[in-house]
Image (cartoon, rainbow, N blue to C red):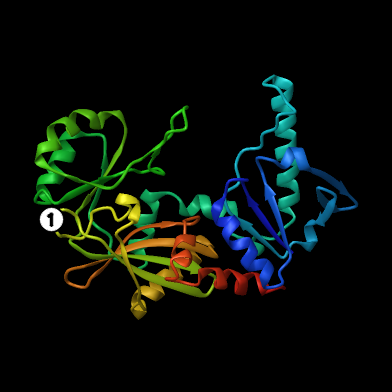
Amino acid sequence: MILILTNSKDATADFLIPILEDSGLKIVRLNTDELVEVASLAYSNRTATLSIQGRNLRADEVHHIWYRRPERLESEQFDGSAEALFSLNEWSAAIEGFLAHVPHRRWMNHPSSNVAASCKMEQLTTAESLGFKVPTTLITQDSIAAIQFFRKCGGQTVVKPLSNGYVERPDGIDSLIYTNRLTSHHLESFAQDISRCPVLLQELVPKESDVRITVVDNDIHAVVLKANDDEGMQRCDIRRNNMDDVDYSVINLPGEIQQCVRELMLRYRLRFAAIDMAIDTQQQWWFFEINPNGQWAWLDILSVTSIGGSFVKAFEDVE
């Protein structure tokens, strides 16, 4: 049995579940934003049982957990009172207790592994220690240090967020913060604002192409992404323009890069991850970041990859 932990609006789960079911795999989808309305939980005689709309699932029956995109528990049953918050906390503790009965190796990925692999600052240190080339980086709130770094890089500098890169607003209209070139024109105002929070600066990599690497257990899918900016150069952030003008092609990783990727997955105890790299004009490979819960379905939808098939293979493996 495969248990999928996500939310009711997860389009990637919507995409993969039919593929898994068509392969004969048994699936239980648990949307955490609906859990309180549809589920109940029991524990007796060292056995934890989760009932979802009348369907009983014991923890020892769970062969794999796909930890996709669960959200905080919520329910219209409860008002905003302290008692309601207590009830939701009890729900959280009960679900966590059920999930704790499933061994780490059966998770894709275990939440603790996702947390460990999600720190961009630490990623850079780990990646470089494993042999990846990493751009020269400065994280600072000091405007003088930022200006000195900019000059040291000959003005070839980018700025990017340390966190998830989203500005979330109450009206639901969120903003995505892209990786941007830092120019001398912007430097003065940027230096004034930098004291508000730490900022990640990197020396600009003269990219020929971006590379998206998706790993599912032993399978590695690597795709080259190309899109030009207004100057005819590889775009600073490939995600702009909704990626409508991106050209895709499959690539085989060089042996040393493949080895680094596998060592990175082992270091963080990950079964799944999306890794962003780039190839520069001298054919050098550069590591940017690893996302232990990154998006991938769009590549299958465009018929560039068959990552869904790798999930089938991974989940067919029953101990």
Please determine whether, in this image, residue 45 is positioned above or below residue 133: above
At mark 1, the secondary structure is loop
Does residue 150 appear left or right of residue 222 in this picture?
left
Q: Position of residue 241 (x, y in %)?
A: 30, 50
Instruction: Indicate the position of residue 304 as horizontal and vertical percent values.
Output: 42, 71
Badge 1, how many Cα within 10 Å: few under 14, some, many 20+? few
In this picture, is 167 found above or below 283?
A: above
Is 312 left or right of 270, judged from the image as shown? Answer: right
Q: Which residue is mark 1?
A: 231
For the point 13% across and 55% down, the residue is 231
| Residue nearest the observer in this picture, 56 or 204 | 56
Q: Residue furthest right?
A: 45
Q: Position of residue 15 (x, y in %)?
A: 57, 60
Name the one closer to the observer, 193 or 27: 27
Q: At 67% from the left edge and 70% from the top edge, which residue is drawn?
A: 22
Residue 72, x across and y down, in percent: 62, 38
Q: Nearer the viewer, residue 299 or 288?
A: 299
The residue lying at 58 percent from left, 46 percent from top is 9
Tell me which amino acid carries mark 1.
Answer: Glu
Q: Is residue 109 visible?
A: no
The quadrant in which the C terminus is found is: bottom right
Residue 305 visible (yes or no):
yes
- Quadrant assignment, res 221: bottom left
Residue 75 to residue 269: above or below: above
Where does the N terminus fall, quadrant-wise? bottom right
